[in-house]
Each structure stands twice: as structure tokens, then as C-alpha cells.
Image (cartoon, helix red, strand yellow):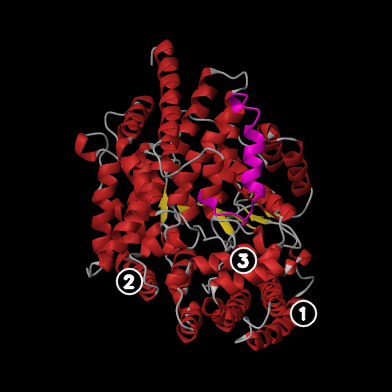
Amino acid sequence: MSRDPWCPSAAVAAGVTVLLLMTTTTATAQDVDDSQSEQIEWDLGEIYPSYEAWNSAKTRLEERVEALAAYRGRLGESAATLREAFDAITGTEKELARLYVFAFLKADEDRRVSAAQERRGLAAALLSEFNETVAFVSPELLRVGSQTVQRYLAEEPGLDTHAFNIRNTLRQEPHTLSDETEQVIAAIGLVVQGPERIYAMLTSSDMPFPTVTLSTGEEVRLDQAAYSLHRASRNRDDRRLVFDRFWGVWKAYETTLGQTLDTHVKTHVFQAKTRRYDSALDAALSGPNIPTAVYQKLIEATHRHLPSLHRYFRLRQRMLGLDDLHYYDIYPPLVASQRTFDIAESKALMRASAAPLGDHYLELLEKGFTGTWMHVYPQQGKAPGAYMYGDVYDVHPFLLLNHNGQFNDVSTFTHEWGHAIHTMLAQEHHPYETAGYATFTAEIASTTNEVLLQEHMLGQDISDEERLFYLGTALEAVRGTFFRQVMFAEFELRIHEMVETGEALSGEKMTAVYEQLLRQYHGADAGVMTIDPAYAVEWAFIPHFYRNFYVFQYATSIAGGTRFAERFLTGDDQARDDYLAVLSAGGSRYAYELLQEYGIDLATDAPYDALIARMDRVMDEIEAILDRKGN
């Protein structure tokens, strides 16, 4: 589950639907058991001290949103008027973000609470009204003309905070529509979000998950959290049972979820055509100004490196001692570990592994650790997954976790705190208008931390078995964050292209497309892994597909993040400054160009080749240990 970031006033200037900066990972929540530690909760009173305060703020914001319409037709009057208008718009927007984040986080504490869901809906409706009210901005700026606007920017210092976003609007002139059309597109914002909301509620609260009895005699309600936990069982019969029963439930909803995703995809295609883009992919990448060559190169490079993925699967089969390999065999760790990690130890490991990032980074981390910024443990009704929400500019980031004490939870912890420190650095260096950053750099901040954590664990004086465990974790990170996300990205591209060519989509057809990709990526035709067609409904389980060409950025980011991490670890003195410069840039630069400046061009083979070279080195080390041990 992931959400597109909101580059705040860029969203307004471009006249697009406002989305908030919420970066996520896909760990899932589970019911609290009797041994669960007492819940560690965030303090949302730092946003609003009470529901009454939230209601009062909402009333004031309704008036402010309505008042913004007074600037329509006036942006060309003078530089002073343009500054006044943008100050009013972004000031209102900043407070709307505060209103929405509070409602969103309260709703995610327990999705069964209707009042909280309604409050979130009210905040979303006001955001939609705001979008509709300011939809005149982009077409009006273009009518004023680039020459006049650039003159205003030069003569009015007060426009400096808005300059990047205003120029970004001028860049998108070919895709900006009339005032009336922009207003219509803005007005349907809530409707456009419908498929995602339906998906979220159906899959987190309404779907009837089965109860299964494991080989231990334990009865488990096989919801998303239990699936994520027990699919990694060391008992193969349990894994197969979990897969069979879990995917059987999703198969029963294949038609409904197919229609939900089909509607979502058709929305993207409609918006792209309306704005005169060549494709939905072109439209999705236009906002952050990412060349489509990045997406194309990513898929091409991944196909070229599939032999390394297949090598990993054969190594997995060897280490698990299996005669053959099935899709339900990809999740158990290569070496079992009984070690667990509480939140205190997770903090300590992140402090140690983040040391190469410098004293200031660690100071910001400590500030976050001593605050009440996190909602930590799973509980019934709580939103699944993990995320960082960083859009309350005047407060601090908030983090939702579902910490179960496994090493993967430590990695997730490190991942999300990477996002939080990124937010803190961006806000430290930039005003609200340019503090919001693109996903393209957001995931570099998190995946770099994951690589540093892996290398920190491997740098300890540990046994061969422990070393194999962490080496296996590193391999699994590449599989899950690179290859798996590219497979998702290719599926997403294919279903959009099918709609664009007039082909009808259905749940059954999506399953067929996904099965073909599963077979290709997992080497089914080469005898590497058996793919049971019953599991190909997995596409319906992936919330990323409701984020509009989002997931590819996990893959580009692990490539970029690994490159930065390896520079740190090989003693490159400039690496820290370069990395922190990228994070501190916030939304003041186009992310692709920013990374290019610091030596990472994700439209070329180099970053992907370097990532897979590291993967191959890890496999070399594992095989050397196994050969030495005679395994």
C-alpha cells in the first residue's frame, strides 16, 4: 500500500488533485495477542488538541477556501497581486493538510470506527472543494503569459518561495485545459478516489477470511497479517495451506476487485487523454518530470538480469533442501532465526547503522525517537502496513507501524524513519511551498537505510548461520524491492495499455496477465519454479495498483539507494554530503535531474547493473559458506 506524494503548492499550481505525502511499506497488521506489549501511540494532540478544535479549524478553512475564488481573474494585475494570491492559496493548503492528516491518522487507528471514517471523508471533501476553487490558477497563469509571469518573478522577492512551482506550471502548458474543464476535473476528485476507498474498506474490514489449523494445532484467522506471518513458516505443508486458503478467498472476489481496478485504470486513461498526453504513463510521469525512458529502461534492465533472480531461486531451493520450488516457497528465510527485536533494540540498531550519515542526521533521529510520533503495534481494526506521513509542516512526521518483532520489522522501522528524516531535512531547508518532495527521491531515503542496516548486521562478529540469515535478508530485499516491484510495474503498464487500445479488462483477464508475468519472472518455463495458477489472483491483493504508476519508484530507489550506501561503505568522503544534499533539496528541484547531478542516472543501465552486481556478490558469499560447510 503506497500513496503518491503531494508536492504541496505544485499540486495547486498545476491544477491537479491534491494528494498527501504518505510513504509506505507493505507489512501488515495483525490482531494483538496476549504477549503483545502495551501499545505505543502517537500524540495527535500535537496537531489538534481535541475534536472540537478540529471542527473549529474546519469551519475556518471552509471560509478561507471560499474566499480564494476572489483571486480568479486577478493573477495578471501585478506582481504584488500574484504574490498575495499564492500566499493565500498555499497558506490555506498548508492548514488543509493539517486538517486532513489528523482525520486520516485517527481513522487508521481503527478503521471500524464510523465517526472517524466520516471525519476523514469530510476532510477529503474540503480538499476536493479547495482543488475545484483554485483550478483556475494554471490556465489563468498561462493566459497571463510566460513573459509577464517571469517579469513578476524577477521584480517581486516575495514570489521566490513560489517560483519553482509557478515555473513548473508554465512547463505544463500543453496539458493545461480551460478554466471550466480544470474545474470539472477538480470537482470529480472524490469520485476518482472511489475505487481506492472501496478496495481499502473491502479488503481491510469486510472480506471474510478463513480460519485454518496449522501443523502445530494452532487455529489462525487467515487475514492479511496472518498470511504475511505464516507464509514464511518453516513447515512446507503450512505454507501450502496458507496459500491455498488465502488465495481462495481472493479468487472469490476476483470479479469485483477486477471491476474496481478497471475503473481506476480507466480514470487514468481518461485523464491522460483529456490532458492530451500520449499515454497514461506519460501523464503520470509528467508531473514529477521523469522521462518515460526511466520506466522503459527499468523494465528492460530487469529482464536482462532475470538470470540472477533465477540463480537466487535455485540457491533458495538448495538451502531449504527442497526437491522442487513452488511459489509458496519464496518467503521463509533461507536460514531460520529465533532472534526477536523490540522497539528499543530497533532504535539502537538504526542509530548504529545510520552512523555514516553524520551527526546532524543522528540528532534529528534522536529528536524523533524521544517524541510521541509513532503508532507501533498491530491491533484489531488498525490500518495494515507501515507508513510515514509528513505533511503537517509545523509539527513533525508521524509513523504508523505494525511491529511484530522480526528482523523484517526492524528493516521496516529503519525504512520509515528514513522517510521521516528526509522530511525533517527538507522542512529544515525549505518553506512549505518547496518542502514536499517527489516519490522518486523519497524511496531513496528509505532504501539507503535498509542497505546500511543489512551491512551493519553483516559487519558484526557473528556465526556462519547468522551471516547466512542476514545475507539471505539482503537477497530477499533485492527480490522484493527490485524484481517484484518491477513485475508490478510491468503489470500496471500492461493493463493501462490494454485499456488504451480499447481492450476490455476483467478480473479473469488481469489474472491471466499476472500469471504470465509470474511465470516469466520466476523462471517457470525453465523449470526454476512451479507457479500454481490459483495464486495468480495475487494482483488483487496489491494496493500499490491504486497509486498510478507508483511502484516502479521502489525499484529505481533501491538501485539509487544502494549506490549511495556503497559509496558510504567504501569510504567515499563526498558521499554523505551528496546524499544529504539530495534529501535536503525537498521539492525545490526536479528529482530526476537532482539525482543526475549527483551521479545517478536512472535512465541508464549503470545503477541497475551495480545493484545486481551486489546481489551476485552476496550469492557468491553464501555459496562459499555453504561449500565450506559441505552443504
Local crowd at mark 2 within 10 Å, few (<14), some, or many (≥20)?
Answer: some
Q: Quadrant of the C terminus?
A: top left
Circle 1: element type: helix
Instruction: Identify the residue position indicated by label 3 in the image.
Output: 8
Given the image, on which type of amino acid does mark 2 rest?
Answer: Gln
Q: Nearer the viewer, residue 522 or 156?
A: 156
User: Residue 541: within the magenta?
Assistant: no
Q: CA distance from mark 1 to mark 2?
A: 39 Å
Circle 2: element type: helix
Q: Is residue 544 above or below residue 464?
A: below
Q: Nearer the viewer, residue 64 or 506?
A: 64
**Cβ–Cβ below 8 Å for labels 3 and 1?**
no
Q: Which mark is residue 426?
A: none
**Cβ–Cβ below 8 Å for labels 1 and 2?**
no
Circle 3: element type: helix
What is the quadrant of residue 340 in the picture? top right
User: Residue 577: within the magenta?
Assistant: yes
Instruction: Identify the residue position indicated by label 1 in the image.
Output: 52
Q: Nearer the viewer, residue 524 or 265?
A: 265
Q: Nearer the viewer, residue 225 or 528?
A: 528
Instruction: Identify the residue position indicated by label 2 in the image.
Output: 259
**Cβ–Cβ below 8 Å for labels 2 and 3?**
no
Given the image, on which type of amino acid does mark 1 rest?
Answer: Glu
Tell me where residue 343 appears, x and y as whole percent: 69, 43
Tell me where residue 509 appears, x and y as whole percent: 24, 62
- Of marks 3 and 1, which one's residue comes earlier in the chain? 3
What is the quadrant of residue 259 in the picture? bottom left
> Could you tell me if residue 350 is visible in this image?
yes
